[in-house]
Amino acid sequence: MEWLGLQFVAELPQSGQVILNCTYDALLVLVAYLVACAASFATLDMAERVGHAEDPASQRFWRWIGALCLAGGIWAMHFIGMLAFQAPIDIQYDLPVTLFSLLIALFASWLAMHTLSEAQPSLLQYLKTAVVIGLGIAGMHYVGMAAMRSAATAWYDPTLFTVSILIAVGASFAALWVAGRLRDGAGLYLQLLKYAAALILGAGILSMHFTGMAALRLVLPENSLPALPPESGHMQLGLTVALITLLILGSAISAALADKKLQHKENDLRRVNTLLTQLDQARMSLQQVANYDALTNLINRRGFNQIFAEKLSQKTKEGGMLAVMFLDIDHFKRINDSLGHDAGDELLKVIARHIKGSVRSHEDVVARFGGDEFCILIGLRDREEARNLAQRIMHKMKEPIELAGRRMVMTTSIGISLFPEDGTTCEELLKHADLALYQSKGAGRNGLHFFNANLKNRATLELQLEEELRLALREENGLTLHYQPIFELRSGRVTKLEALVRWQHPVHGLLTPDRFIAIAETNGLIAELDNWVLRKACEDLGELSRHGCDELKIAWNCSPLNLAREELADEIETALRTAGVSPERLELEVTENALMGNIANTLVLLRQIRALGVSLSIDDFGTGYSSLAYLKRLPLNTLKVDRSFILDIPKATADMEIVQAIIVMAHTLHLQVVTEGVESLEQYEFLERSGCDFIQGYLLSRPVPLSELRPVLEEIDQRKHAHAVNPLSRARGTSAPVSLDPAAKSPGSHAGASVVRPIR
């Protein structure tokens, strides 16, 4: 029977001569076994390197090295085994067929290493791969046998042939299974186990070869004489092939060992780097503990003093100003006493975020000194920057805070000292800021004070102003209203006026609200001041009607404190009825934070006022906190965009986009939009293009008394007729003012008696 070119026979033919005296050279058999063991050990070592390699390129490299070692070792063992075969006839070998058997061995070896590269091969996967590899090794063997060229005919015993294939499959499975178990191990025990496994696998590979050789029967044709084999150099050739193979395998094993040591060094270096990183993190953690407050994550007193000394040294050398601010939360002890220290800690976290959110994130330093005391260090160009920052913080602090199921508003007292005018050392500036803080507390809290050598004199002056303001309200003497035109873009005329309160002091001259509003609020005069502004604005509306301006409306600012008074709606109704003015000509302006302070009560009060026919406007929109969910429920007519969004237009693209978004949102809610602070033609043209309804600012006019209002309105009307394309365009040389004026409305001015708002 012939199958795949091989002739199988159960019994040899009766005719012919069987060569029975074939022998093997024992030394070459031993050499072949050593080569098989070396190839097995190299394969196990390469499999271990594949398992430990971290990058795919290294895995591919060691996989190919392992495949070459296994293929070369098995093929060399087979070649040496064939050289050890001694027959009494001349046997030659076909070189191309022999080399083809090497390719088969290489394919089987590559498949074995590919399987070993898998992370967790299953037992079934091992078995499938072992079958393919075993067939490949058997194929290599029998292709090598087919390379024999002699006068005899090769017959194979089918039983031994089958057994040899099963041995090849079994040896392959054993090699795969052992290599998969040993590649992730380490230590002397596993190394000895690897040596033992190599000896056993080498014996398996050799057994397959000689079982296949045992299946061979050489039969000479009948009546033919065997050609005697020539003097052979099989021993020398076999030893040479074995030496070369062992050198190659040894080089591969040495390279694997060197790579293993190098990887261990890299792992050691990586562990050292990890340890150094952990040490750096521990050092940073210690520094965090030493220099930062654990509760608020702000810098503590120690960290602040270090930064303060550095900045003070820098400013001393380079020149410039610094401001030190001490902040103390008003009546904080009541929180701890009533709600507990846990609630107090949560409140301190919220307050710390408020303060941090009010400063310039990268330039200013915020620290917590302990308890409810905070300190801020800022670089500045003039003292007004420090005032503006303090006012921003005070404004931010008035946002309601939900704590322990309660809604509360906290205030802060602030003391400020300046470098170099108030001191040149850290200790001196901190002490002076602390003195200014105590002055703020003594003045009724919820205020700010700069250090001054004449602090007592200033306190006396504040007391005097309080008495004089009380007298001015009682006698209605000295207080006056100024009006700033509000221009309607659609009609091209002034349709509104904003009423702005001023105090003509007999000694200090014309005072703006930032000089007396805080006094009025602190001493319970704010309701009386607001009511005076309301009554005066209604009287002036009647006066305007008698002079033919019966379509003008007046916008009146209401203090946030007054929104908590239920009698406000009755006071408005009384003022309108007394002056004989239609409610539709009065507009009440309130800030968005005032609206959000107590939304439930505010909503009821605003609906009462709106039911009178009075228009409602939200002032300084964008500077505080507004919930759109509440905004759409409020009975508003107008939304006034804060001037801080207009200042940098047209240079600031972000501000332009914000203003456009506010206009679109307001129109969606069916609200008209007034933009204040308009000072240039570029701003006017931008707002006109964006669909704004009204503008207000120095481009039209500064606030003026009622007696000077008619000429201002006439001048604006003349500009409209003189410049049909742009009714507000004018030359710089005209009399209409452009420069800022301390008596004009600014973000710190007040029409009725609102809180002084910060200049941004």
Image (spheres, rainbow, N blue to C red):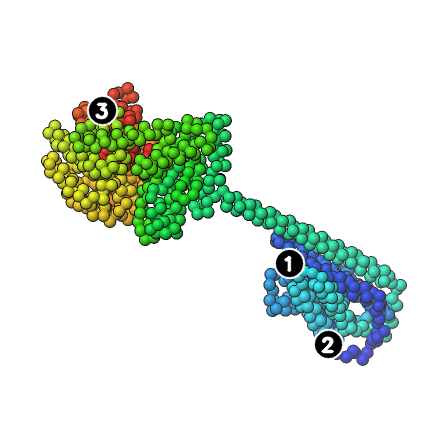
Question: What residue sits 64% from the left and 57% below the top?
Answer: 52
On screen, residue 745 above or below 565: above
Mark 3 secondary-structure assignment: loop
Report the disc number at residue 51. 1
Check disc 1 and give the amino acid type.
Gly
Q: Quadrant of the N terminus?
A: bottom right
Q: Amino acid at mark 3?
A: Pro
- Give the numbered dot on residue 159: 2
- Horizontal and vertical percent for residue 705? 20, 26
Work out how far the residue at label 2 is from the one at label 1, CA to CA, in angstroms.
Answer: 39 Å
| Label 2 or label 3, whichever comes before in sequence order | 2
Side (left or right) of 140 relative to 119: right
Which of the 4 image quadrants contains residue 729? top left
Look at the image and tell me whether residue 595 can be seen.
yes
Camera-nearest label, 3 or 1: 3
> Mark 2, residues whose alpha carbon is within 10 Å: few (<14), some, or many (≥20)?
few
Mark 3 surroundings: few (<14), some (14-19) or many (≥20) residues within 10 A: few
30 sits left or right of 289 in the view:
right
Check disc 3 and report the residue beneath it: 506
Q: Mark 3 vs mark 1: which is more N-terminal? A: 1
Q: CA distance from mark 3 to mark 1?
A: 94 Å
What label does residue 15 carry, if any? none
Q: Distance from label 2 to label 3 (Cα)?
A: 130 Å
- Dot 2: what SS? helix
Q: Residues within 10 Å of mark 1 (few under 14, many from 20)?
A: many
Query: Which marked residue is nearer to the observer: mark 2 or mark 3?
Result: 3
- CB under 8 Å between discs 3 and 1: no
Between 206 and 571, the residue placed more toward the observer is: 571
Return the x and y of residue 436 as percentages of the image width and height.
37, 33
Q: Secondary structure at mark 1?
A: helix
Which amino acid type is shown beneath numbered disc 2? Thr
Q: Nearer the viewer, residue 692 or 464?
A: 464
